[in-house]
Amino acid sequence: MFLAELDSEERIAFIELAALIAKIDGDLSIYESPILTKYITEMGLESYRLRGLGIENILEQFKSERSKNIVLTEIFQLIFSDGVFHDEEQESIRFIKEHFGFDSSEFESFKGWIGKIRELSISS
């Protein structure tokens, strides 16, 4: 939705992060795979090959508050796509939240907003 606003380094970092999160529970679900494809297309990264970067290196690429908000919004959409919030995903989100410096109320607001978007997309 907002990924086109990221700069080229942030786009690469984002797709690395999304791929890492999608596979973190040991399985790339049938719900997560199309979302990753959508992200790749939206950011024009069709020829990019994943390098398997570490999460700390990935998160360092996002400097602005806007970029951090975009990342958290899109990662929540990916995580909630299969309807299950796995323990490994929760740990990763907690790490991202702390690394980006989101306070708990801001974090819960994002989480709730994405849940509402998901409900709307399922209803249509």
Image (tube, rainbow, N blue to C red):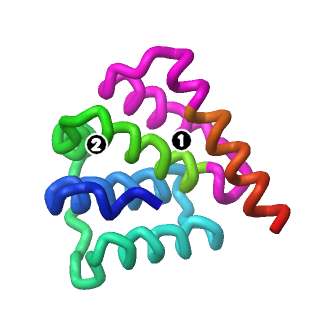
Whether residue 49 is in magenta: the answer is no
Residue at image coords 38%, 73%:
42
* Kind of residue at disc 2: Ile
Q: Which residues are magenta?
A: 80-109
Q: Residues within 10 Å of mark 2 (few under 14, many from 20)?
A: some
Q: Residues within 10 Å of mark 1 (few under 14, many from 20)?
A: many
Residue at image coords 39%, 61%:
19
For this orientation, the residue located farthest to the right is 123
Residue 83 horizontal/vertical position (percent): 73, 52
* Kind of residue at disc 1: Glu
Out of 117 and 24, give the one closest to the viewer: 117
In 3D space, how far apart are the residues under numbered discs 1 and 2 (Cα atoms)? 13 Å
Residue 82 horizontal/vertical position (percent): 69, 58
- Is 91 rendered above or below residue 58? above
Identify the residue under disc 2: 55
In terms of image quadrants, where is residue 121?
Answer: bottom right
Identify the residue under disc 1: 89
Residue at image coords 64%, 72%:
30
| Element at label 1 | helix
| Element at label 2 | helix
Residue at image coords 47%, 34%:
93
Left or right of 42, for residue 106: right
Q: Earlier in the sequence, mark 1 or mark 2?
A: 2
